[in-house]
Image (cartoon, rainbow, N blue to C red):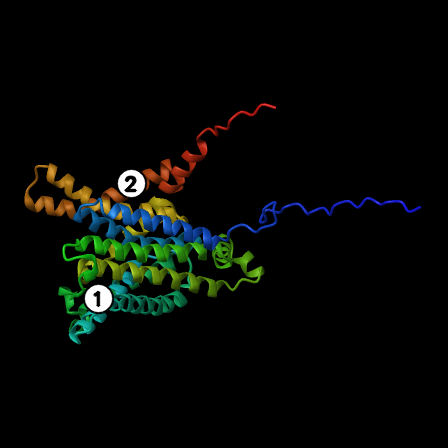
Amino acid sequence: MSATRAVAPPTRPPAGPGVRPSGAPRGSTLLRHLAWTVVAALALLAVSYQLEPFRSFQFATVAAYLCATAGLTVLTGLNGQLSLGHGALMATGAYTVALCQTAFADRGTTGGWVLPVSLAAAILTTVAVGAVVGVAAARLRGPYLAGVTLAVAVVVPALTVTFDGVFNGEQGLPVPVDPPPAALGLDFPYERWQLWVAGSASLLALLLLGNLVRSRFGRTFRAVRDDEVAARLAGIHVARTQVLAFVVSAACAGLGGALLAVLAQSVSPGAFSLTLSLFLLMAVVVGGLGSLAGAFWGAVLLVALPDLTHTLTERLALSPAMAQRLEGNLPLAIFGITLVVVMIAAPGGVQGLLSRLVRSLPARRPSRRS
Protein backbone atom coordinates (compact mmCIF):
# COMPACT_ATOMS: atom_id res chain seq x y z
CA MET A 1 0.00 0.00 0.00
CA SER A 2 1.63 3.27 -1.14
CA ALA A 3 1.44 6.35 1.00
CA THR A 4 0.57 9.70 -0.58
CA ARG A 5 3.27 12.25 0.01
CA ALA A 6 2.20 15.90 0.32
CA VAL A 7 4.30 18.26 -1.74
CA ALA A 8 4.73 21.78 -0.34
CA PRO A 9 4.36 24.63 -2.80
CA PRO A 10 7.63 26.28 -3.79
CA THR A 11 8.49 29.33 -1.76
CA ARG A 12 9.36 32.61 -3.47
CA PRO A 13 12.34 34.63 -2.38
CA PRO A 14 11.52 37.82 -0.56
CA ALA A 15 11.15 40.88 -2.71
CA GLY A 16 14.21 43.06 -2.72
CA PRO A 17 14.29 46.81 -2.80
CA GLY A 18 14.24 46.89 -6.59
CA VAL A 19 11.65 44.15 -7.16
CA ARG A 20 7.94 44.22 -6.52
CA PRO A 21 6.33 41.38 -4.51
CA SER A 22 4.89 40.01 -7.72
CA GLY A 23 8.37 39.65 -9.18
CA ALA A 24 7.97 42.39 -11.79
CA PRO A 25 10.76 44.98 -11.80
CA ARG A 26 9.94 48.55 -10.97
CA GLY A 27 9.80 51.22 -13.61
CA SER A 28 13.22 52.42 -14.60
CA THR A 29 14.50 55.91 -13.91
CA LEU A 30 14.28 56.75 -17.59
CA LEU A 31 10.58 55.87 -17.76
CA ARG A 32 9.86 57.87 -14.61
CA HIS A 33 11.69 60.89 -15.96
CA LEU A 34 9.93 60.53 -19.30
CA ALA A 35 6.59 60.53 -17.52
CA TRP A 36 7.46 63.70 -15.60
CA THR A 37 8.68 65.33 -18.82
CA VAL A 38 5.42 64.55 -20.60
CA VAL A 39 3.43 65.95 -17.67
CA ALA A 40 5.54 69.12 -17.65
CA ALA A 41 5.16 69.50 -21.43
CA LEU A 42 1.38 69.17 -21.21
CA ALA A 43 1.28 71.69 -18.35
CA LEU A 44 3.43 74.10 -20.36
CA LEU A 45 1.15 73.69 -23.37
CA ALA A 46 -1.96 74.41 -21.28
CA VAL A 47 -0.43 77.40 -19.50
CA SER A 48 0.86 78.96 -22.73
CA TYR A 49 -2.71 79.55 -23.94
CA GLN A 50 -3.52 81.50 -20.76
CA LEU A 51 -0.51 83.84 -20.77
CA GLU A 52 -0.16 87.29 -22.25
CA PRO A 53 2.55 87.73 -24.91
CA PHE A 54 4.94 89.48 -22.49
CA ARG A 55 4.52 86.75 -19.86
CA SER A 56 5.09 84.10 -22.51
CA PHE A 57 8.35 85.81 -23.41
CA GLN A 58 9.35 85.91 -19.74
CA PHE A 59 8.65 82.19 -19.29
CA ALA A 60 10.64 81.47 -22.46
CA THR A 61 13.55 83.44 -20.99
CA VAL A 62 13.27 81.39 -17.79
CA ALA A 63 13.51 78.22 -19.89
CA ALA A 64 16.65 79.55 -21.61
CA TYR A 65 18.32 80.46 -18.33
CA LEU A 66 17.26 77.10 -16.88
CA CYS A 67 19.52 75.29 -19.35
CA ALA A 68 22.53 77.28 -18.13
CA THR A 69 21.72 77.05 -14.41
CA ALA A 70 21.06 73.30 -14.66
CA GLY A 71 24.43 72.74 -16.33
CA LEU A 72 26.19 74.89 -13.73
CA THR A 73 24.43 72.92 -10.99
CA VAL A 74 25.90 69.70 -12.37
CA LEU A 75 29.38 71.23 -12.55
CA THR A 76 29.50 73.07 -9.21
CA GLY A 77 26.92 71.28 -7.10
CA LEU A 78 27.60 67.69 -8.15
CA ASN A 79 31.25 67.80 -9.21
CA GLY A 80 32.58 70.59 -6.99
CA GLN A 81 34.20 72.73 -9.73
CA LEU A 82 33.75 76.47 -9.40
CA SER A 83 33.15 78.31 -12.68
CA LEU A 84 33.00 82.06 -13.18
CA GLY A 85 32.99 81.86 -16.96
CA HIS A 86 29.63 80.40 -17.88
CA GLY A 87 28.52 83.72 -19.31
CA ALA A 88 31.30 83.37 -21.88
CA LEU A 89 30.14 79.84 -22.75
CA MET A 90 26.63 81.18 -23.25
CA ALA A 91 28.09 83.86 -25.54
CA THR A 92 29.79 81.12 -27.57
CA GLY A 93 26.48 79.38 -28.19
CA ALA A 94 24.70 82.67 -28.91
CA TYR A 95 27.22 83.84 -31.53
CA THR A 96 27.30 80.41 -33.15
CA VAL A 97 23.55 80.32 -33.62
CA ALA A 98 23.64 83.90 -34.93
CA LEU A 99 26.28 83.04 -37.54
CA CYS A 100 24.45 79.88 -38.59
CA GLN A 101 21.06 81.57 -38.88
CA THR A 102 22.59 84.46 -40.85
CA ALA A 103 24.30 82.02 -43.23
CA PHE A 104 21.03 80.17 -43.81
CA ALA A 105 19.16 83.45 -44.38
CA ASP A 106 21.75 84.71 -46.89
CA ARG A 107 21.36 81.53 -48.90
CA GLY A 108 17.58 81.69 -48.72
CA THR A 109 17.37 78.40 -46.83
CA THR A 110 14.22 78.03 -44.78
CA GLY A 111 12.37 75.19 -43.10
CA GLY A 112 11.59 73.71 -39.74
CA TRP A 113 14.97 71.95 -39.60
CA VAL A 114 17.05 75.14 -39.82
CA LEU A 115 16.74 76.25 -36.18
CA PRO A 116 17.44 72.78 -34.69
CA VAL A 117 20.56 72.51 -36.85
CA SER A 118 21.75 75.92 -35.66
CA LEU A 119 21.09 74.98 -32.03
CA ALA A 120 22.99 71.71 -32.50
CA ALA A 121 25.92 73.62 -34.03
CA ALA A 122 25.90 75.99 -31.05
CA ILE A 123 26.01 73.05 -28.63
CA LEU A 124 28.87 71.34 -30.50
CA THR A 125 30.91 74.54 -30.65
CA THR A 126 30.44 75.19 -26.95
CA VAL A 127 31.33 71.57 -26.18
CA ALA A 128 34.64 72.04 -28.02
CA VAL A 129 35.39 75.23 -26.08
CA GLY A 130 34.29 73.60 -22.83
CA ALA A 131 36.55 70.61 -23.46
CA VAL A 132 39.59 72.87 -23.87
CA VAL A 133 38.74 74.85 -20.73
CA GLY A 134 37.88 71.64 -18.86
CA VAL A 135 41.26 70.06 -19.60
CA ALA A 136 42.98 73.12 -18.15
CA ALA A 137 40.56 73.30 -15.22
CA ALA A 138 41.11 69.64 -14.30
CA ARG A 139 44.69 70.49 -13.35
CA LEU A 140 43.74 73.38 -11.07
CA ARG A 141 42.03 73.72 -7.71
CA GLY A 142 40.46 76.42 -5.61
CA PRO A 143 41.25 80.04 -6.53
CA TYR A 144 43.38 78.97 -9.50
CA LEU A 145 40.37 77.26 -11.09
CA ALA A 146 38.23 80.35 -10.42
CA GLY A 147 40.94 82.50 -11.99
CA VAL A 148 41.03 80.49 -15.22
CA THR A 149 37.26 80.55 -15.66
CA LEU A 150 37.27 84.26 -14.80
CA ALA A 151 39.81 84.84 -17.57
CA VAL A 152 37.52 83.00 -19.99
CA ALA A 153 34.63 85.26 -18.98
CA VAL A 154 36.75 88.30 -19.83
CA VAL A 155 38.52 87.03 -22.96
CA VAL A 156 35.57 85.65 -24.95
CA PRO A 157 33.53 88.91 -25.06
CA ALA A 158 36.76 90.77 -25.87
CA LEU A 159 37.32 88.52 -28.90
CA THR A 160 33.98 89.61 -30.36
CA VAL A 161 35.22 93.21 -30.30
CA THR A 162 38.69 92.37 -31.61
CA PHE A 163 37.39 90.43 -34.62
CA ASP A 164 34.70 92.95 -35.45
CA GLY A 165 34.74 91.91 -39.09
CA VAL A 166 33.13 88.62 -38.12
CA PHE A 167 31.21 89.50 -34.95
CA ASN A 168 30.41 93.17 -35.76
CA GLY A 169 31.99 94.50 -32.58
CA GLU A 170 29.82 96.14 -29.95
CA GLN A 171 26.85 96.29 -32.30
CA GLY A 172 26.53 92.53 -32.36
CA LEU A 173 24.80 90.34 -34.90
CA PRO A 174 21.14 89.84 -35.82
CA VAL A 175 19.57 86.41 -35.43
CA PRO A 176 17.02 85.91 -38.22
CA VAL A 177 14.38 83.39 -37.18
CA ASP A 178 11.55 82.00 -39.28
CA PRO A 179 7.98 82.78 -38.19
CA PRO A 180 5.81 80.09 -36.58
CA PRO A 181 4.62 77.33 -38.91
CA ALA A 182 1.70 78.29 -41.10
CA ALA A 183 -0.28 75.31 -39.79
CA LEU A 184 -0.69 77.14 -36.45
CA GLY A 185 -2.56 80.00 -38.10
CA LEU A 186 -1.70 83.49 -39.25
CA ASP A 187 -2.71 85.10 -35.94
CA PHE A 188 -0.70 82.69 -33.77
CA PRO A 189 1.27 84.72 -31.18
CA TYR A 190 4.97 84.72 -31.90
CA GLU A 191 5.81 84.84 -28.16
CA ARG A 192 3.87 81.61 -27.61
CA TRP A 193 5.90 79.96 -30.34
CA GLN A 194 9.07 81.17 -28.61
CA LEU A 195 7.85 79.65 -25.35
CA TRP A 196 7.23 76.33 -27.07
CA VAL A 197 10.71 76.27 -28.62
CA ALA A 198 12.57 77.29 -25.47
CA GLY A 199 10.42 75.10 -23.22
CA SER A 200 10.92 72.02 -25.40
CA ALA A 201 14.68 72.51 -25.46
CA SER A 202 14.90 73.01 -21.68
CA LEU A 203 12.71 69.99 -20.93
CA LEU A 204 14.89 67.83 -23.18
CA ALA A 205 18.01 69.12 -21.43
CA LEU A 206 16.52 68.44 -18.00
CA LEU A 207 15.51 64.93 -19.07
CA LEU A 208 19.05 64.13 -20.15
CA LEU A 209 20.60 65.73 -17.07
CA GLY A 210 18.19 63.95 -14.74
CA ASN A 211 19.15 60.58 -16.15
CA LEU A 212 22.84 61.52 -16.10
CA VAL A 213 22.65 62.47 -12.42
CA ARG A 214 21.01 59.14 -11.54
CA SER A 215 23.47 57.08 -13.58
CA ARG A 216 26.94 55.87 -12.66
CA PHE A 217 28.35 59.09 -14.13
CA GLY A 218 26.41 61.07 -11.55
CA ARG A 219 27.75 58.85 -8.79
CA THR A 220 31.31 59.39 -9.99
CA PHE A 221 30.67 63.15 -10.10
CA ARG A 222 29.60 63.13 -6.46
CA ALA A 223 32.46 60.82 -5.45
CA VAL A 224 35.03 63.19 -6.95
CA ARG A 225 33.31 66.14 -5.29
CA ASP A 226 33.32 64.52 -1.85
CA ASP A 227 36.87 63.18 -1.80
CA GLU A 228 39.21 63.04 -4.78
CA VAL A 229 41.72 60.77 -3.02
CA ALA A 230 39.06 58.21 -2.09
CA ALA A 231 37.61 58.37 -5.60
CA ARG A 232 41.05 57.75 -7.10
CA LEU A 233 41.59 54.78 -4.79
CA ALA A 234 38.20 53.43 -5.88
CA GLY A 235 39.40 53.36 -9.48
CA ILE A 236 37.77 56.58 -10.72
CA HIS A 237 39.74 58.65 -13.22
CA VAL A 238 39.39 62.04 -11.51
CA ALA A 239 40.67 64.25 -14.32
CA ARG A 240 38.51 62.52 -16.93
CA THR A 241 35.46 62.85 -14.71
CA GLN A 242 36.07 66.56 -14.18
CA VAL A 243 36.51 67.18 -17.90
CA LEU A 244 33.29 65.27 -18.62
CA ALA A 245 31.40 67.38 -16.07
CA PHE A 246 32.74 70.57 -17.61
CA VAL A 247 31.79 69.43 -21.11
CA VAL A 248 28.23 68.58 -20.03
CA SER A 249 27.89 71.92 -18.27
CA ALA A 250 29.31 73.78 -21.29
CA ALA A 251 26.80 72.09 -23.61
CA CYS A 252 23.93 73.27 -21.41
CA ALA A 253 25.37 76.79 -21.24
CA GLY A 254 25.73 76.91 -25.03
CA LEU A 255 22.13 75.80 -25.47
CA GLY A 256 20.95 78.45 -23.00
CA GLY A 257 22.90 81.20 -24.75
CA ALA A 258 21.63 80.11 -28.16
CA LEU A 259 18.04 80.18 -26.91
CA LEU A 260 18.53 83.68 -25.48
CA ALA A 261 19.86 84.85 -28.85
CA VAL A 262 16.87 83.30 -30.64
CA LEU A 263 14.45 84.97 -28.22
CA ALA A 264 16.07 88.41 -28.50
CA GLN A 265 16.77 87.91 -32.26
CA SER A 266 20.14 89.61 -31.71
CA VAL A 267 23.38 89.03 -29.83
CA SER A 268 25.98 91.48 -28.52
CA PRO A 269 28.96 91.17 -26.15
CA GLY A 270 27.26 93.42 -23.58
CA ALA A 271 24.60 90.77 -22.94
CA PHE A 272 27.20 88.22 -21.78
CA SER A 273 29.42 90.20 -19.47
CA LEU A 274 31.15 89.07 -16.29
CA THR A 275 28.07 90.15 -14.33
CA LEU A 276 26.04 87.42 -16.02
CA SER A 277 28.54 84.77 -14.88
CA LEU A 278 28.29 86.05 -11.31
CA PHE A 279 24.50 86.09 -11.52
CA LEU A 280 24.44 82.49 -12.75
CA LEU A 281 26.63 81.29 -9.90
CA MET A 282 24.60 83.16 -7.28
CA ALA A 283 21.36 81.91 -8.85
CA VAL A 284 22.28 78.23 -8.45
CA VAL A 285 23.41 78.85 -4.86
CA VAL A 286 20.22 80.70 -3.94
CA GLY A 287 18.02 78.16 -5.73
CA GLY A 288 19.71 75.17 -4.15
CA LEU A 289 23.17 73.97 -5.06
CA GLY A 290 23.24 70.38 -6.29
CA SER A 291 19.54 70.16 -7.20
CA LEU A 292 18.01 70.52 -10.66
CA ALA A 293 14.87 71.86 -9.02
CA GLY A 294 17.03 74.50 -7.39
CA ALA A 295 18.31 75.44 -10.84
CA PHE A 296 14.72 76.23 -11.81
CA TRP A 297 14.28 78.63 -8.88
CA GLY A 298 17.56 80.27 -9.79
CA ALA A 299 16.41 80.79 -13.38
CA VAL A 300 13.16 82.32 -12.16
CA LEU A 301 15.13 84.71 -9.96
CA LEU A 302 17.34 85.73 -12.90
CA VAL A 303 14.28 86.80 -14.89
CA ALA A 304 12.31 88.31 -12.02
CA LEU A 305 15.18 90.41 -10.65
CA PRO A 306 15.40 92.95 -13.52
CA ASP A 307 11.62 93.38 -13.46
CA LEU A 308 11.72 93.98 -9.71
CA THR A 309 14.56 96.48 -10.08
CA HIS A 310 12.70 98.40 -12.78
CA THR A 311 9.59 98.54 -10.60
CA LEU A 312 11.55 99.87 -7.62
CA THR A 313 13.27 102.58 -9.65
CA GLU A 314 9.93 103.69 -11.10
CA ARG A 315 8.38 104.12 -7.67
CA LEU A 316 11.29 106.19 -6.37
CA ALA A 317 11.33 109.88 -7.28
CA LEU A 318 14.83 110.04 -8.78
CA SER A 319 16.48 111.93 -11.57
CA PRO A 320 16.92 110.06 -14.88
CA ALA A 321 20.69 109.79 -14.42
CA MET A 322 20.37 108.50 -10.86
CA ALA A 323 17.61 106.08 -11.87
CA GLN A 324 19.78 104.68 -14.67
CA ARG A 325 22.75 104.28 -12.35
CA LEU A 326 20.62 102.66 -9.67
CA GLU A 327 18.98 100.31 -12.12
CA GLY A 328 22.40 99.18 -13.32
CA ASN A 329 23.80 98.43 -9.84
CA LEU A 330 20.69 97.50 -7.87
CA PRO A 331 20.30 93.93 -9.26
CA LEU A 332 23.75 92.91 -8.05
CA ALA A 333 23.09 94.44 -4.62
CA ILE A 334 19.73 92.69 -4.30
CA PHE A 335 21.28 89.41 -5.42
CA GLY A 336 24.06 89.77 -2.86
CA ILE A 337 21.64 90.55 -0.02
CA THR A 338 19.41 87.64 -1.06
CA LEU A 339 22.44 85.33 -1.12
CA VAL A 340 23.47 86.33 2.40
CA VAL A 341 19.93 85.95 3.77
CA VAL A 342 19.44 82.56 2.13
CA MET A 343 22.80 81.24 3.35
CA ILE A 344 21.88 82.24 6.93
CA ALA A 345 18.23 81.19 6.95
CA ALA A 346 18.31 78.28 4.49
CA PRO A 347 21.80 76.91 3.67
CA GLY A 348 20.24 74.46 1.22
CA GLY A 349 18.72 77.26 -0.85
CA VAL A 350 15.11 77.70 -1.83
CA GLN A 351 14.72 74.05 -2.82
CA GLY A 352 16.25 72.88 0.47
CA LEU A 353 13.85 75.10 2.40
CA LEU A 354 10.87 73.73 0.48
CA SER A 355 12.04 70.15 1.05
CA ARG A 356 12.33 70.77 4.79
CA LEU A 357 8.85 72.29 4.88
CA VAL A 358 7.40 69.26 3.10
CA ARG A 359 9.14 66.85 5.46
CA SER A 360 7.98 68.78 8.50
CA LEU A 361 4.32 68.40 7.60
CA PRO A 362 2.66 65.88 9.95
CA ALA A 363 1.97 62.57 8.29
CA ARG A 364 -1.72 61.91 8.52
CA ARG A 365 -2.50 58.26 8.18
CA PRO A 366 -5.99 56.84 8.54
CA SER A 367 -6.38 54.81 11.70
CA ARG A 368 -7.07 51.13 11.19
CA ARG A 369 -9.15 49.06 13.50
CA SER A 370 -8.47 45.42 13.93
Q: Residue at x 25, y 59 (%)?
A: 259
In the image, residue 129 sits, relative to residue 43, either above or below, namely below
- Residue that sits furthest to the top in the current view: 369
Asked which quadrant contains residue 50, the reply is top left
- Residue that sits furthest to the right in the current view: 1
At label 2, counting other C-alpha atoms closer than 10 Å, the crowd grade (few under 14, some 14-19, many 20 or more) is: some
Q: Residue at x 22, y 69 (%)?
A: 111
Are the two marked residues, 2 and 1, in contact with CB atoms closer than 8 angstroms?
A: no
Residue 328 in picture, x, y percent from top left: 16, 48
Helix, strand, or loop for circle 1?
helix
Can residue 153 be seen at all in this image of the molecule? Answer: no
Name the residue tied to disc 1. 158
The amino acid at mark 2 is Thr
The amino acid at mark 1 is Ala
Front residue of this view, candidates 341 and 199 = 199
In the image, residue 285 sits, relative to residue 181, either above or below, namely above
Helix, strand, or loop for circle 2?
helix
Q: Which mark is residue 96?
A: none
In the image, residue 145 sits, relative to residue 168, either above or below, namely above
Left or right, 85 with reference to 212: left
Q: Residue at x 26, y 45 (%)?
A: 47
Residue 95 in picture, x, y percent from top left: 23, 66
